[in-house]
Image (cartoon, rainbow, N blue to C red):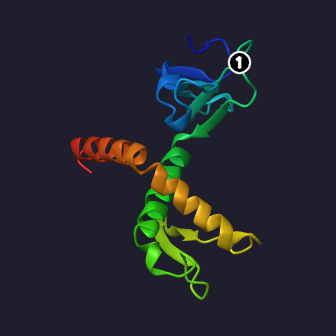
Amino acid sequence: MKIPTTLKHKPVIVSENYENIDGRKAYNTDAKGLSLGLAQWNDRGKLDISAKVWRYTGEKWSRQSEELPMHRVLDLAILICRSSLHFQDAYRLPKLYDPEKTMIDRIGMQGDAMTVSVCTENPMIDEDIKLFSQALSEDGEMMGERLRILSRLLKEMGY
């Protein structure tokens, strides 16, 4: 299925078979494609690029399609990586986190830092963090494959 090019987001680079590789939902997902292109929120004279997940309901392109600025995609990747690193050793903590020290890390960027913390505002955090850890573990092979690809590409780029 071809990603539409007549909408406000203007695709430049596309992956139109994303439905075949969408994690646990592969071959059974409404996420049909990914694109990198010109952002839909561009003002005249200002140019931003973005990443977009294209969803298709079976009848039309969904309003639930998500468009993200590319730096946010990378920020999400950083958050995923740092969270995964935490859970590699979290089994040593009775609650999978330290209630006295809920901040996992502060990752410096842009003159400030991204704070990565356990969300103790969640009243069900003790149960939810166990479920999160379990899901992360069950998806370990699938995530590992993607992280190895990302690592290889970053090395090829000189990072």
Q: Residue furthest bottom?
A: 100
Which residue position holds label 1? 61
Q: Position of residue 128 (x, y in %)?
A: 66, 64
Q: Position of residue 139 (x, y in %)?
A: 47, 48
* Relative horizontal placement of residue 131, taking residue 143 as reference (left or right): right
Element carrying mark 1: loop
Against 87, residue 155 (above or below) is: above
Query: Picture quarter containing residue 38?
Result: top right
Q: Assess disc 1: are there few (<14), some (14-19) or many (≥20) residues with their C-alpha within 10 Å of its C-alpha.
A: some
Q: Position of residue 37 (x, y in %)?
A: 53, 26
Query: Picture quarter containing residue 44?
Result: top right
Q: Residue at x 44, y 80 (%)?
A: 92
Q: Amino acid at mark 1?
A: Trp
Against 147, residue 92 (above or below) is: below
Q: Residue at x 74, y 14 (%)?
A: 60
Quadrant (top left, top right, bottom left, bottom right) of the N terminus: top right
Query: Picture quarter containing residue 65?
Result: top right
